[in-house]
Image: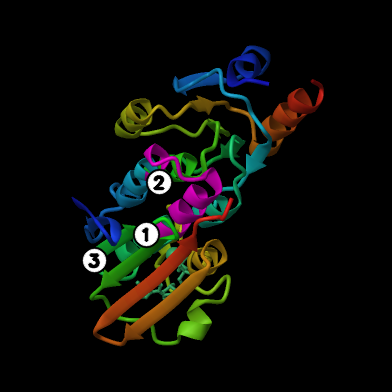
Amino acid sequence: MTINELIKQLPLTIISEGDLSREISKVFCCDLLSVAMGKAPADCAWVTVMGNVNTLAVASLTDAACVTLAEGTVLDEVVVEQAKTQGITVLATTEPVFDMALQIHQKLTAE
Amino acid sequence: MSDQTGSAGVVLKYTVSPDDFTRAGEASSKVKNILKQMGISPDVIRKVSIAMYEGEINMVIHAHGGEITVTITPQEVLMELKDVGPGIEDVEKAMKAGYSTAPEQVRALGFGAGMGLPNMQGCTDEMKVETELGVGTTITMSVHMEDK
Ligand SMILES: Nc1ncnc2c1ncn2[C@@H]1O[C@H](COP(=O)(O)OP(=O)(O)O)[C@@H](O)[C@H]1O
Ligand SMILES: [Mg+2]
């Protein structure tokens, strides 16, 4: 499933638009950036409440397909601009981490 | 950053600024992009990116920034991270997953889980930590190119 297809089916808003045609491999949850750095699978949809500039660095270095900010986490204007320049897709939802991750997982496995 | 190509391979040099969290990761991102352009395998790129980013973050959090030299040869990606920070008192302890002396404000940013050095070791084929209290720390890491 691509990011685009996912957005159409779930309550997600686009904060920064990267390549929305990217295929998602898995859903991944973690708020500790060092752990995410070591464990996030490539092309994953990473769900987190940690929204800062280092989140972008980790997403980019691990080659995550997109970052999904849960629980209504907001990004600084400056960070949003950086995400846009770096072409990193950032999505947002007011739902809790687990609920959003579960829904993404269900969509991915229903294919 | 400077960039020289010679018989020793491609040599890249970066300066990591102290206490600047917003810029930490810049050097790793640049190296990642260069490796991509060189057509290096995604697995090698991922390992180098993770190891170097953790090292870079450590230089920002625990030392006062420093210098990174990356040498790319057909056999390996060699990274040397040199700082003149406080040094590491007990390297064996520091290498343990979960051990961290990171201050609270660093934890609030999602770091300080004590996973950095273990991640660096896990991602690299060779790693050497040279450190002296009050003098600084030099970490040398190598990721071998896969023979395919
Ligand atoms: N470059 C460095 N200079 C001084 N101390 C360091 C350096 N890198 C790591 N350390 C020490 O080793 C500990 C463990 O490092 P690490 O595994 O990366 O965990 P974390 O960075 O999350 O604390 C740090 O908390 C710090 O005490
Ligand atoms: Mg660390």
Q: Is mark 3 within 8 Å of ligand 1?
A: yes
Q: Position of residue A94 (x, y in %)?
A: 58, 27
Local SS, label 3: strand
Identify residue type, mark 1: Ile
Question: Is B108 in front, or is A47?
Answer: A47
| Badge 2 density bin: few <14, some 14–19, many ≥20, Cα 10 Å | many
Q: Quadrant of residue B122?
A: bottom right
Q: Quadrant of residue B20?
A: bottom left
Q: Position of residue A1 (x, y in %)?
A: 68, 21
Asked if badge 2 and badge 1 are on a common chain, one would say no
Q: Describe residue B78's horizontal placement relative to residue A28 as left or right.
A: left
Looking at the image, the residue that sits furthest to the front is: B7
Does B110 appear in magenta? Answer: no
Q: How far apart, in angstroms, are the residues tagged by discs 3 and 1?
A: 11 Å
* Residue drawn at 74 percent across, 26 percent down: A108
Q: Chain of mark 1?
A: B
Residue, disc 2 = A54
Question: Is A74 in front, or is A34?
Answer: A34
Identify residue type, mark 3: Gly
Mark 3 or 1, nearer chain start:
1
Question: Residue B66 shows which numbered tag?
Answer: 3
Does B49 appear in magenta? Answer: yes
Looking at the image, the residue that sits furthest to the left is: B2
Q: Is residue A61 above or below residue A94?
A: below
How is the rendered protein coloured?
A: rainbow
Q: Is residue B107 above or below residue A69?
A: below
Question: Residue B57 shows which numbered tag?
Answer: 1
Residue B110 visible to the viewer: no
Q: Describe residue B69's horizontal placement relative to residue B96 as left or right.
A: left
Q: Is residue A25 above or below residue B84?
A: above
